[in-house]
Image: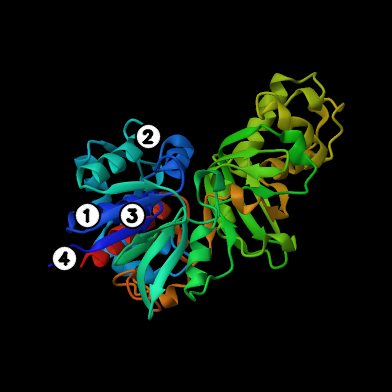
Amino acid sequence: METIKIAVIGGGAAGMMAAIHAAEAGADVTLVERMNACGKKLRITGKGRCNVTNDCSLQDFLQNVPSNPRFLYGALSFFSTEDTKRFFEKAGVPLKVERGRRVFPVSDKAEDIVRALTDTCRRVGVKIQYGRAEKLLTENGRIMGLVVNGETVAADRVIVCTGGLSYPRTGSDGDGYRLAREVNHTVTPLTPSLVPIVSKSKFCPALQGLSLRNVALTVVDKLNGKTVYEDFGEMLFTHFGMTGPMILSASAHIPDVSSGKYEARINLKPALDEKILDERIRSDFAKYANKDFGNALDDLLPRKLIPIVISLSAIDPRKKVNSITKEERRALCDVIRGLRISLDGFRPITEAIVTKGGVSVKEINPKTMESKLCEGLFFAGEVLDVDAYTGGYNLQIAFSTGALAGISAAQ
């Protein structure tokens, strides 16, 4: 029996995992990567630490996938979070589990994850060809190969793993969507997800560079007062608005940020209830009894925040703290427990961690990742219309859909 020839387009998480599984199943595999090295985006994920997966059950996993979770059931059952952990441990990368069940390499180096994948590709005989996949070649509704840098590459099966539109400098610039459309696939609207948020609030430029840790974030729909998202952790103010882990996660929960109907409420002291916070403020005021209010908050708040909190509290900064009333203290508590920042837009898709939208999953067989429109054509990873919240879920989707596409294509 002749060996099946498979071309995998894209040397990222999904592409390398697809190539490895196809080669292990006996196929002759060529991985086509347009950059000068595989895994460019992987190297910068998780601030260069690489959150490879999430140590959770299948049901918990699917609850963290807002777009088309049921489509992923087959892929995640075939190659689970446990399988991902086993794969990297076996490839010589010890792993650890951190807060939120996030799994990282013990070394905290994304480079180790990339090396494990590229070394395994070499070991199982995957050939890597550097160049751009310009066109898919089809005949009578079946894949015949592709054109790479003007030259025809024959293939019995092609797996498209080109990523989304985020981080174009790493190679994901939307090529996969173009290839999909050329063979009549539907590409759903493409928007940023896990992306920094723009705010028109005058506070953000004043707070630029201020990093807050152990604060609580609530995103509220101002029209009905409903909470859209809640989180606890880190965030960072920038000249345009806000970023950081909590803000990126929140972005995935906000359907139409440009409407101006959402606002962030930041509790700067979530560990203290109103009564204990008031006691803390009174204690500080006793310590600075003869000082002006404007000079009595250094123990309580970061320096950059003090002028803003004073302004919002409407207390005269020159007022002596020993004459501040109970009502004024309550106003101060309210500001500290609920600093309000308007949410007015997302940063460009090129700054997003993932792309929301992609090749319509209605046109893909969830049991194999094969196209329903073109025989022998498969899709995996971010190019598909699936995305998840932050926490290792998106990389696991890439590994699971890649592994399933690779094994299916080789059969």
- Residue named by callout 3: 399
Residue furthest left as drawn: 1
Mark 2 → mark 3, Cα distance in angstroms: 17 Å
Q: Nearer the viewer, residue 137 or 281?
A: 137
Quadrant location of the N terminus in the rendered image = bottom left
Q: Decide: is 146 above or below 290.
A: below
- Residue named by callout 1: 23
Residue 207 x %, y %: 72, 34
Residue drawn at point x = 36 percent, y = 71 percent: 143
Q: Are marks 4 and 1 in contact (CB under 8 Å)?
A: no
Q: Are marks 3 and 1 in contact (CB under 8 Å)?
A: no
Q: Decide: is 248 above or below 189.
A: above
Labels 2 and 4: the sequence-earlier one: 4
Residue drawn at point x = 21 percent, y = 59 percent: 27
The numbered mark at residue 111 is 2
Labels 3 and 4: the sequence-earlier one: 4
Q: Nearer the viewer, mark 2 or mark 4?
A: 4
Mark 3: secondary structure: helix
Q: Nearer the viewer, mark 1 or mark 2?
A: 1
